[in-house]
Amino acid sequence: MAMTVRLPEELDAQLEQIARARHTSKHTILIEAATRFANSETKTDRVLSIADEVAARYADTLKRLEDA
C-alpha cells in the first residue's frame, strides 16, 4: 500500500545518515523501524493480557501478601 510520510527535517536527516551508512534506502529503514515497533507493541499487549489473567487468578493471594 502506498503512503506519504511527512517527517520533521531533523528526523529525515537522521534517517538519511542511517540509510547512507547502511547502503540502503530510507524506505527500508522506515519499514524495519515500523516492523520492530509493531512487534514490540504486540508483545506488550500479550504480556499485559497475561499479567491481567495472573492478577485475576491470584487476586486473593496477592491481597494476603499485600496485607502481610
Image (spheres, helix red, strand yellow):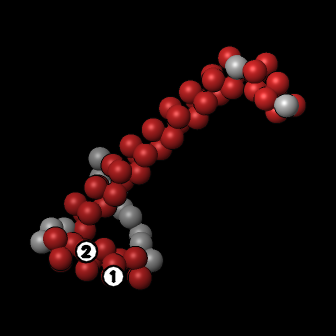
Amino acid identity at mark 1: Ala
For residue 20, above or below residue 45: below
Residue at 28%, 55% in the rendered image: 32
Residues 47 and 66: in front is: 66
The CA distance from mark 2 to mark 1 is 9 Å
Marking on residue 13 = 1
Left or right: residue 51 compared with residue 61: left
Residue 9 is drawn in which quadrant?
bottom left
| Picture mark count | 2
Residues 18 and 66: in front is: 66
Disc 2 residue crowd, few under 14, some 14–19, many 20+, Cα 10 Å: some
Q: Quadrant of the C terminus?
A: top right
Task: Say what secondary structure mark 2 lies in.
Answer: helix
Q: Position of residue 62 (x, y in %)?
A: 76, 26
Q: Are marks 2 and 1 in contact (CB under 8 Å)?
A: no
Residue 61 is drawn in which quadrant?
top right
Disc 1 residue crowd, few under 14, some 14–19, many 20+, Cα 10 Å: few
- Which residue is disc 2 drawn over? 18
For residue 34, above or below residue 56: below
Q: Earlier in the sequence, mark 2 or mark 1?
A: 1
Marking on residue 5 = none
Q: Position of residue 49 (x, y in %)?
A: 58, 29
For residue 40, above or below residue 15: above
Q: Position of residue 25 (x, y in %)?
A: 19, 68
Residue at 25%, 68% in the rendered image: 26
Q: Position of residue 43 (x, y in %)?
A: 45, 38
Amino acid identity at mark 2: Ile
* Farthest front residue in view: 68
